[in-house]
Image (cartoon, helix red, strand yellow):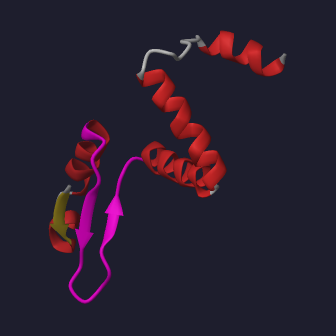
């Protein structure tokens, strides 16, 4: 994660914007006397929020982590998005 000052961010905003989009890594914007903020791609932020929501419920977190373990152990079933959609609708 890169930390940059308010002044540097003002001077090079476009390059920092491009860098965070291309690397998917957040950039910390620091301003003396103020709380720091993070700049990151919107879809990354949405993924973080969705993950936090899904893991908020202990039962759901256990279910998801169990599914990941099964997949990593080779017991998972790989489906295309179309196959998954047909299973969900059924």
State yes or no: residue 28 in magenta: yes
Locate the N terminus by quadrant. Answer: bottom left
What residue occupies the far right of the structure in this picture? 90
Give the camera-side residue of 73 and 50: 73
Work out whether residue 11 can be spotted: no
When asked about the image quadrant of residue 81, the answer is: top right
Give the camera-side residue of 54 and 31: 54
Locate the C terminus by quadrant. Answer: top right
Residue 78, compared with residue 67, is above or below; it is above
Work out whether residue 21 can be spotted: yes
Give the camera-side residue of 70 and 32: 70
Residue for point 17% across, 72% down? 7
State yes or no: residue 31 in magenta: yes
Residue 38, compared with residue 35, is above or below; it is above
Q: Where residue 82 sits in the image (x, y, percent)?
A: 67, 11
Relative placement, left or right, of 62 versus 16 is right
Relative placement, left or right, of 57 versus 72 is right
Residue for point 64% across, 46% down? 60
The magenta segment is 23-41
Q: Where residue 86 sits in the image (x, y, percent)?
A: 76, 13
Q: Where residue 84 sits in the image (x, y, percent)?
A: 67, 16
What residue occupies the far bottom of the structure in this picture? 33
Residue for point 25% across, 68% down? 29
Q: Where residue 50 sits in the image (x, y, percent)?
A: 57, 48
Give the camera-side residue of 88 and 26: 88
């Amino acid at each position: 994660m890169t930390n940059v000052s308010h002044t540097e961010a003002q001077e090079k905003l476009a390059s920092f914007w491009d860098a965070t989009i291309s690397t998917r890594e957040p950039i910390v914007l620091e301003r003396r006397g103020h709380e720091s903020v993070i700049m990151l791609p919107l879809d990354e932020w949405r993924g973080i929020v969705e993950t936090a929501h899904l893991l908020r419920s202990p039962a759901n977190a256990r279910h998801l982590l169990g599914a990941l373990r099964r997949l990593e152990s080779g017991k998972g079933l790989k489906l295309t998005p179309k196959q998954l959609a047909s299973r969900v609708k059924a």
